[in-house]
Image (spheres, rainbow, N blue to C red):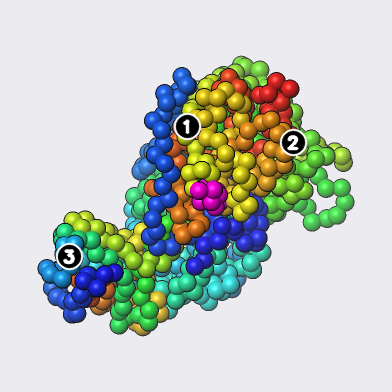
Amino acid sequence: MTPACSFARRGGLLLAALVIASVATGCSSGSASIKVADPWARASSATAAAGAAYMKIENAGSAADALIGASSPAATTVEVHETVALGSPAPAASGGGSMMGMQPIKRLEIPAGGSVELKPGSYHIMLIGLKQDLKVGDTIEITLTFEKVGEIKVSAAVRES
Amino acid sequence: MAASPRPAAPTRLALLTALALGFAALAGIAIGTVAWLSFPAPAPPSSTSGGAIWPVSPTPEGLDRDTAVRPAVPAPPLRLTDQEGRPFDLPSLRGRPVLVFFGYTHCPDVCPTNLADVRDALKLVDGEVGVVFVTIDPARDDAAAMKQYVDYYQAGYIGLTGTEDEIRAAAGAWGVSYAKVETGSASGYAMAHTADTFLVDAEGRLRHRIWFGAGPEILAARVNALATEAPATPGPASPPATTPAAWPPPSTPAASTPAPPSAGPSPATAVRVRLESAVVRAGPNRIVVTVSDPDNRELAKPDVAASFTFRSTDDPALAPVEVTGIFIWVVRGGKAAYVAEMTLPRPGGYDATITLDGPAGRVGSAGFTMVAREQSPTPPIGAMAPSVRTPVAADVGGNLQLLSSDVFPDLRFYEHSVDELLAAGRPFVFTIYSPAFCPTTACGPLLRYMKEIATEFPAMTFVHAEPYVMRDMGGRIQPEYEGNGYAWASWSQAYGIPVEPYVFVVGADGRIVASFELIVGSDEIRAAIRTATGE
């Protein structure tokens, strides 16, 4: 992370479930413009070891940005993880799939002019140590930290699936 | 960082005991984003010396994907403890279809997705369906944890736990692999695991194995299809007579307790047979099967003879093919298998039987079915070996750790590329195998045995390549992911291999002398080398 690109925007805009933040200056390689669409969290009991939230992160800017952290008042710790298939698919005529594993992602790049979808079976925001039940109809606040545009707060609606 | 090029010993053991051609990922998991390991751009496929390229056919996704388990064998046991602390086994749910899947309660994404998919699927299904969630993390998931977890989704779902040994045995019997993975997350360790959903019919037979992420519609379609079947004929019209030997018939109340409790001369053991080979073709074949008893104990032994019979189901008038099996070690002194070498007269379905006879008499027999394809994805014996550029030591400045996931890479295997050997007219043995990431239970210490063979045959050239596109994780390499698994490297695609390991023995004329899929005995390779070199 170059100093020129580390300019962080604190706060950010909260606009229902659609958030836009952008940095127009301060980085020689162009600017990132991050939009978070349809953030949601899966309904979960507070007794569950961990919950998950999903969303689509779009970058309309001309420079790549990266999600480098997250936090939420609803959980003790928030991490970005990726669910990955391990091993090759089943041989022959088997309807089975690969073994599924999970890895923490320290830096999730959002390419310039592109988007990354956090969805079940793929990237997800892992909510560790839930402080409350995630009940359908509730919303929880999640603060996403990006390398360039800084922090963005989103309200994730709690849904069943 | 948890990445380690070798699985911990218990993991490897668990994988070897897992019966299925599972998807056991081994070793570490990629962390973060690191630069690609770039091999020099492969030379244009020098028109493959006249040999055809067999493309890997994509697996159909969606509703058309074949998920059926054939034949419909009685479901393996689930003699575990339910969320109320009571003993459980599957026959208690007889009379309704049951969806079974494995996971753990600390699982934030895959398991809730599976549970939500199942719950949504059952909204599309009429009638009662049992739902059973089995933990593969018994260290953290006691009955109370399972109760909290399943009750949250739906009262009536069953959550099973047990001792580590019980869980290992149950998962192995279902072909479910799992491994503990230290990820450095605040949530503690993660469990990588097979996340397929299994559908057991109302008669207790395992009917479908459905991949993770298939979604509620496909799950519902498979359950609903059971209801529309003609009653009592859900399986093949006439299942191989020997199949039920694996388990008592579904109507037996004491299901899955095949051995009589009394001592004395034990009658034939219940034999569970697994066809390990992914490629079966009309014409000359080499197939590998593994056999175990219902408790996963190895039944293949040097002093136990195996005989095979193959009957065409498409043309029953054809005389059955009968051959004697060849015993091979997968791991010397440990896991073993039998090879059947035979010529199948036509493509299509075959009912096969394996009969085991030991020093004390008949051990038992079991049936399995297989489908011989018209053509195989890999080049047949006698075909020209595809000319492909494989990475060599010079590409990486001699740092073999960037070419091989082998803990002790042997320079002899990385001195020459396949295209170079073909052009020079030199015979060679080409091993496509990932010592650290081979995902199937067929994975043994293949490369270690191959090094011994290389020493025995100094005139032969040996080439090893990882089957997958690998990336440099900072001095160690790990496979790149693609779709539902690892990304196949260009040479794997050129040779059309659907699984690993694969060994091709190629003669000086560039033609394939022998190919070995998955499990191969050292003596088989020695014999093929003698053929290739005209010894």
Circle 2/circle 1 CB separation < 8 Å: no
Query: Which residue is under mark 3?
Result: A28
Q: Observer-nearest residue: A12 or A131?
A: A12
Q: Main secondary structure of the magenta part?
A: loop
User: Which amino acid type is marked by label 2?
Assistant: Glu
Q: Chain of mark 3?
A: A
Q: What mark, if any, has residue B388 been given in the picture?
A: 1
Rendered position, B490 above or below B110: above
Instruction: Give SS at disc 1.
Output: loop
Query: Which residue is under mark 2?
Result: B456
Q: Observer-nearest residue: B389 or A112?
A: B389
**Is B398 inside the magenta-drawn segment?**
yes
**Mark pair 3, 1: CA separation:** 43 Å
User: Which amino acid type is marked by label 1?
Assistant: Val
User: Which amino acid type is marked by label 3?
Assistant: Ser
Circle 3/circle 2 CB separation < 8 Å: no
